Image (cartoon, helix red, strand yellow):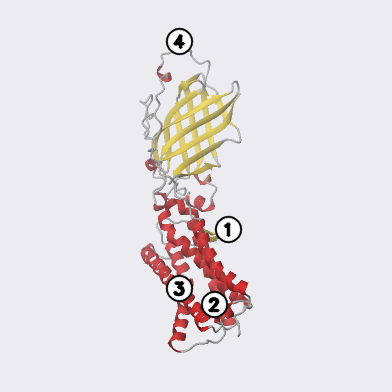
Amino acid sequence: MPRYSLAAIILHWAIAALLAFQISVGWALEDLGARGFALYQLHKSVGIAILALTLLRIGIRYWKPRPAKLEGGWQGALASTVHGGLYAFMLGAPLTGWALVSTAKVKVPTLIFGIIPLPHLPLPASAHGLAEGGHGLIAWMGIALVLLHVAGALRHHVLMRDGLIWRMIPNRSTALLIGLPALILLGFALGRVILPVAAPVETAPAEQLEAPEPVAPEASTNATEPDNSTVANETVAQVEEPIGPPPAWTVQPGGKIGFAVGNDGQTISGSFAKWTAAIVMDPDHPETADIRVSIDMASASVGDAYQDGMLPGDEFFAVAAHPTATFTAKGAEKTGPNAYRASGRLSLKGVSKPQTIRFTLSGDGATRKVTGTATIARAAFDVGNGDSSGSLAPNVAVTFAFTAKRKP
């Protein structure tokens, strides 16, 4: 009995396994929310791979024609219809998925398997609903066609015993007859195995931050931790006047400003690669502090190419319109041994709000190590305003650590 070409056979089983994986993953994606972000990117990559392999399969079909049909009548017509429907499914599902992504409100960049950028299709946003509905409908129709195709293959092999299935097996090997169809089950099982485990629900609400009473204009905040320390309220018996102007400090290379935000039971952590700080302060007289930190928002990274591609967009930092975030503070207060609090203003994404930072100093003399924290209410700055941010915690934890040397 004549067989399909080896290339057609390989593509047939490879596409079948990938389709099984896609179906397995696709069922779960909608319920995963933000936890399924990485899997969603993989789903897109596999979909484009199926599209490319299907186009190759069509080309080989015309280059090396398929063996002649063994059955006529309505049964043969049904088989031809199912085959045609399967090709429409293998082309239509990835194309509507591509259209869905291209017309979404939040433009999530696509890197095929993290390497090759996929451009968005030039479609209007109004086509999103049609693409979304079409993608789901085609998926269900494809499942029905796959089941019909499998049923037809089993009918020929088990009931009619005409050996039709051997046309899609490289040789009459029982191991291949079992192993190749098993790839489909393996693809489906793999799609289930890699699904994220449901995260436990955290019952403790995120800290709601109250501002301390302002000690200077613009010193109140609605996005910082409450301070119950009474150290700052102690009466100082004797106030020493600073000797001369407060020293200026130079931040040394190797410092870091990081951020972290909860994401449906998990944590997304990142950092800013480019930032500068101008600091004037006498540690013994913190009221002399004059602090200004500028952050290049385009340098933000969470270590994932897909999510990094989203950060500069309007949903998060809107870097094109607001490339820099700044924190400024005049004066600070001591809250404990080597511990300080500075209340000032944070300007981010075109919004300026009161903000407080806490920091500690270690070392003495001309070199000090600085470590600190802040908690930022992202909604106050319109950060994370899209559909993909629904699972993000309301507060973002910011940490910083660097070494500073006193200028001569």
The crowding category of the residue bearing disc 4, from other C-alpha atoms within 10 Å (few below 14, some 14 to 19, many at least 20), is few
Q: Secondary structure at mark 3?
A: helix
| Residue that label 3 marks | 147
Between residue 297 and residue 232, name the one nearer to us: 232
Residue 20 x %, y %: 50, 66
Mark 3 vs mark 2, CA separation in Å: 21 Å
Sequence-wise, which precedes: disc 4 or disc 2? Answer: 2
Residue at the disc numbered 1: 115
Marks 1 and 3 sit apart, C-alpha to C-alpha, by 34 Å
Q: Position of residue 231 (x, y in %)?
A: 43, 19
**Tags 1 and 4 in contact by the CB under 8 Å rule?**
no
Q: Are marks 3 and 2 in contact (CB under 8 Å)?
A: no
Q: Tell me what residue is drawn at x 55 percent, y 87 percent.
A: 68
Q: Amino acid at mark 4?
A: Gln
Which residue was labeled with disc 4? 238
Tell me the residue that label 2 is attached to. Answer: 58
Q: Residue at the far top: name it.
A: 237
Disc 1 from disc 4: Cα separation: 64 Å
Which of pointers 1 and 4 lies earlier in the amino acid sequence? 1
